[in-house]
Image (tube, rainbow, N blue to C red):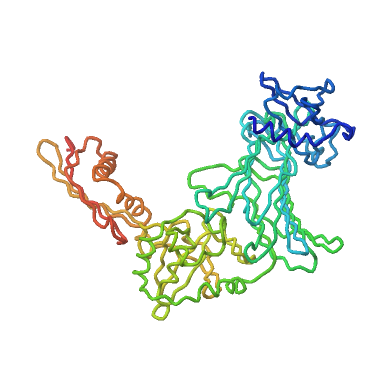
Amino acid sequence: MKKLLLIAITLISSCTMPFVKKAPHAFNDMVYLKNGEEYHCEVIGTKDTFLIFITEKGETSMPLSKILSVDLARKRQGYNWKSVSDITDKTLLEALKFPLSDFRGMGYVNIYVEKKLKINRDSTYVYTERYIRGITDERGRNAGNISKLYRWKNEKLQIDFARTVTGDGNVLNLREIAIEDASIYSRYPEHENMHERKFAMPEVKPGNILDWEISIRGKITKDNPFVMDEYIGDNGPTADAYFIVEFPSDFDVAYSVYGMTEPEVKKQGKNTTYVWHVKRIPPLLREIMCPPPVYLFPRVVAGLKSSWNDIVEEYKDLLSVKGTLSPDSAYKLVLKTIKYIDVPSSGSSIFPRKAEEILKTKTGNSLEKAYLLYTLINKDKHHVELILVRSKERGMVSVSTPSLLQFDGALVRCDSVWYDPTYEIIPPGYIRPEYQGVYALSLSSGAILKIPLLEPEKESETIRRSVKLYKNGDALIKDRWIYRGKKLLSIRTWKYLQEEERRKQIEGMIGNQFPNAELKRFSIEHLNDLCDSIVINTEYTVDKLG
């Protein structure tokens, strides 16, 4: 706390009393005393050993020795608004007329949402996102916890404003202490890029209106081929929403839309603007087997026009390695020596590190492990492709908006066999469900292709059972359980368990069907190899079965 106080005093001590301008006081600063008292105020500066600040009662001086800490508010847009009568933003004023009572029981309602991409002539871009959200009842109290991801090595994020308009007409601005910025993958420094900015809106109570806007700034480059890939919709209903893309009229911009029609096109000066306007978006109703939200809500993907062939050229030098190993030997080597780091390429780097560096650190994400596998396989004897993929959770690839940022992982196809070298338990030929049936990019040909869905027999569970029933009703049961596909991956993780732990797992599986069963013996085939099936043999007794 002393450190916080020293920082605050250092910042404000440069303000000398004679140069303070007279203006309407916002009272957005906070002064905390050691005795527990706190003041909403506007800090003016320091004089000798006193802190000078203004409250609603007038100017106050406080000995520095009594102060625990000072929280200086940032002067964001509208920081000096204290009541509804001060507000000059027409969009917010219109939103304040919204009938919140019509949506009671929903928790909250998004009165107005705007997501906008502006591309400038120098290829810099500004993505802005504004929400005006009304809290309708107690269920909406968590609707003021806001977060946004961004790529901090390529972009800068700022909170343009964040305020709450209370039911009795007061305007409360975001406090700096309520803001947090954290790295998502700080445990992996070589992959650290994705950050999350989080903040908590003030006074999230029924009848209050939350209004915030964030902006992300960056430049479209080879390493940052930015596209706006956004949908609008969440757990609350949305009354009015806009997607906007603005760019110089002589630029070529490509886009894809999902759940909407073509945009309204506006031209003003040297710029062109695409506008999609959507009304009455229903809330997300979470049900069993419900698809991810990106498939259910209106979505826009937009960015500078390019071609997949141009993108493949960026990988040309990386793919020029010949390799010397057979596919299976290379696959086993990558699985054995490189630890998988679960960091999407879209959240770290769209290009893998060099093979030598991956081998040196013995770590790699999906893209890097697949790339290393690609470099090791003998290209003179095998047709090998490095293929970029996108998880189903993130929605379909926009074929008309080429960008490497659309992908989050990679596979290798060698001749006709698929390899997913992420986890060391995945057999050759198996593709994890999140990548089955998705569109992908072959970096060898520049072609967009579709990852196949596996045949049902490759995602199967088979039980072969023999039962010997004794005269007293007891039974001796011998089972042979055969697992393929996703269940195989789950069982194969047992290789890391002790024998007794495996026994408990099997006893639990048997107990689900026969609660009074007693396991006599068991064995597991192909637990430690890469066979495409795992077999569990069990022998157990069940009292009074017949």
Q: Residue sitting at 66 percent across and 70 percent down? A: 306
| Rendered view: 294 above or below 98 | below
The quarter holding residue 124 reads bottom right
Q: Quadrant of the N terminus?
A: top right
Q: Spot the residue most to the left.
A: 471
Q: Is residue 477 left or right of residue 69?
A: left
Q: Residue sitting at 74 percent across and 55 percent down? A: 244
The quarter holding residue 305 reads bottom right
Q: Is residue 389 left or right of residue 465?
A: right
| Rendered view: 410 above or below 34 | below
| Rendered view: 160 above or below 400 | above
Q: Spot the residue most to the top.
A: 35
Along the line of sight, the residue nearer the viewer: 405 or 72: 72
Q: Spot the residue most to the bottom.
A: 380
Along the line of sight, the residue nearer the viewer: 509 or 324: 324
Along the line of sight, the residue nearer the viewer: 243 or 407: 407
Total labels drawn: 0
Along the line of sight, the residue nearer the viewer: 190 or 259: 190
Q: How far across and how far down the image is residue 246, in percent?
A: 77, 59
Q: Is residue 182 left or right of residue 19?
A: left
Q: How far across and how far down the image is residue 302, in percent?
A: 68, 60
Q: How far across and how far down the image is residue 63, in percent?
A: 75, 22
Q: Quadrant of the C terminus?
A: top left
Q: How far across and how far down the image is residue 154, in percent?
A: 65, 57
